[in-house]
Amino acid sequence: MMELNLTRVDYLQVGVTSSKSMRLLPPQIPGKPQRIVVGDHNGELQCLGMKKGEAVPVFNATLKKKITRVELGGPVGGTRERIFATSGSEIKGYTKKGKNFLSFDTSLAEPIQTMYVEGAELFTCGNYVYNHYHDCKDANHFLSADSICDVICIPTNKVPNVTPVLACQDRVLRVLQDSDLLYEVEVPGPPSVMQLYGNDGGDEGDEILYGTSDGRVGLVQIGRMAPSHRWELPNEKRNGGVLALDSYDITADGVLDLIVGRDDGLVEIYSYDESDEPIFRFKQQLSESVTSVQGGVIATQGFDEIVCSTYAGWISALTSEPNIKESGPDVYHLSDQGREKIIGLRSLAFWRLRLPLLHLPGMLLVLIQLSVCCNTGLMCTGWVLGLTSEQMSKGLSSTPIIPDTAAKAKINSLKGELEELQQKVVTEREKYQQTATSKTAISAVPHFDINDKFVLNREDASYTLSLELQLPIDNVLLQSDVPIDLLDVEKNSAVVSYSACNPEEGNFLLATYRCQANTTRLELKIRSIEGQYGTLQAYITPRVQPKTCRVKQYQIKPLSLHQRTHVFDDARPLNTIKLSGPFSLAEVHSWVCFCLPELPERTPPGDCITFHFVSTFLDTQLECVYRTGFDSGSNAKVTKKGEAIFRSDNISTISILKDVLTKEATKKKISLNITYEINDDSIPYTLNLIHPKLEYQLLLAKKVQLIDALKELQVHENDTTFMSPEYRQILEDAEELQAEFKRQPCHLERLYGMITDLYIDKFKFKGQNVKGRVPALLEVLDNYDLQTLVQFFESGGENRPS
């Protein structure tokens, strides 16, 4: 398989961009360079072409509000060369030459977040509401149960019926027919973006690629009555969430490749094997979130590129055009003797030595390259390799080397631009100094946008907090009123320092991250403790004058380590708590949202609502069901009554819900009737779920404790064959073991804490206080054995086994 070699090129910078806000217009003639269309948060829509490596404006348009989506449209099955852009609740349409042919105000209450165009069909979505317009006239609408992240439509030239698909935050793709839900497709993570497979939906037009916010990519076939999952790419390396997808033959093998852009700045390329499964081929790390990717020919005819837009507005490309110029002897002014010597050495290298020219001695290659660099400013290589310095000095004439005219013009242009920018900086600095000392000047706080994300990772039961600015970040201060752990992040180059804080005053964490120069994105990892809830605050200070910062708040919820799922096992031993009282669906939904993450702010439609969750730390499960009904009192007065039922195999989860929901209802002065059923079999079941995790952490801690002693033995003894195979393996894996132990600080203590809570909660529901027996429980854990621990729970610790 041919190695893929792509080079990054930066073209220009616009304002802050949203996902899918950059597109490439189709070429007027196949193979010719294409134009770039991009919209930013300043409301600027720009169409750009490339000429001699420079971005040349074709047309500009200014919209009233920030541009959230740019799409291309055209006749069904034809060329998509009409430009559509969303701004607030308005949609603008432009031809490829910049003529405004459409101004459509949808009059929607919420701004348009996503859009798709298919012939005369226009699909728009806000946060929860989907609208379908035919020739700009209302056709259908749909209210989603959770927020909508993207919308797409199956090509109508392949599938006769208009079939839109919504990607929703609750890990579901919703397939619609008119204004009704046809069916739901469950996917492994919250889908953030969709793209037609092969840009046309495949052979039958019903295949859709999707990317999730937790970094997975998959392919699903949307059948008429049921879906079919084709393949899924797991996120084993824990890369960022997927923001952009495209299909383009960048490998030039006649088969479209898959291009993936992620919110951690990673761009990936996958090819397909014989069974149409994706195979990793190439990756490039950018420093900012990649909001759009698309393959095409931009700068130079004959060289494919992957064009990327980033959150900060950079339009960059990964180009197949080599950045090293290959040249023969005709480029240089050589004497006849020098020219003949070059050709002779070339023939000698190929025919007699049977070696390619790149295998000639490297020292001579370096000498010639340095000579060319000093005279031209460019790195020029060719088949002049192999000449000695003596022969080259005799063969070369005194005529100077003539550089590439286009390259020389590019260098001069860059030098001029650099000088202009330096002069502009000096002028602005002087202007600022004068203004700062003026008595009449008014200091204005600079405004800056923050692209932030606070999401739960199932793999390691931690939260990822990512902060991204268009400006360089100076420092970030974290403050929390609940206990949390900060975990190491390999990509994070910031220096962290901790300040002393007093937990009695409600301050459990005070940490400062100082960023290196030109850092615009910072990623942190946090692990919370279930049952303890509060607020994490981030104070973000960019490198701007005057100094200013913005505060972002993130809620640490009582059951913060639970994640939405579509699967619930009724065969497990379950504990149940039932709450009833005069509350509405909206009220109980707000209480559940306060307790659990990944729930929509808006109450889902219907009289009965069901949610399922799984604990990312322990793999226990939780079911939430709430509904409303009507009761008739003795005085024939009808009163509204609500009911909420929670089931879980973890009794601690039930205990946390009981405490928090009771507290929230008391704030609203709502009287609750609470009943519960405790299944004693759930205790050993939960302990069995914890067992492999606890056993692994105990073994890991034991191995890490032995490393220093074993290394000391290794220093004094040259031969370590006397050691047992287990000890030798620990020495070999020492670095990996220490790194893993460092990545999971306090993991063992967390498991001890959860077992302790399980013990206390079991007897709390029986009306007993067993906190005095906790030291005995910890003694059992120090000499851990599963059966002994189960017996301790069953006996209550009174008749502890010796």
Image: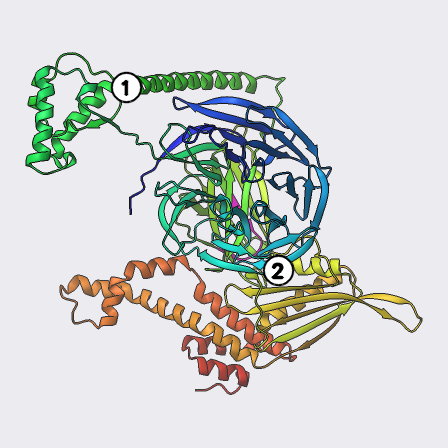
Tell me how far mark 1 sits from mark 2, CA to CA. Answer: 63 Å
Q: Nearer the viewer, residue 135 or 654?
A: 135
Q: What is the x, y in percent for residue 502?
A: 55, 54
Type of amino acid under label 1: Asp
Query: Mark 1 Cα within 10 Å, few/some/many (few <14, many 20+)?
Result: some
Tag on residue 404? 1
Q: Earlier in the sequence, mark 1 or mark 2?
A: 1
Residue positioned 38% across, 21% down in the render: 52
- Asked if 62 appears above or below 714 in the picture, the reply is above
Q: Which residues are magenta?
A: 477-485
Tag on residue 679? none
Type of amino acid under label 2: Leu
Q: Is residue 480 magenta?
A: yes
Residue positioned 12% across, 32% down in the render: 363
Q: What is the x, y in percent for residue 211?
A: 50, 50
Q: Is residue 360 magenta?
A: no
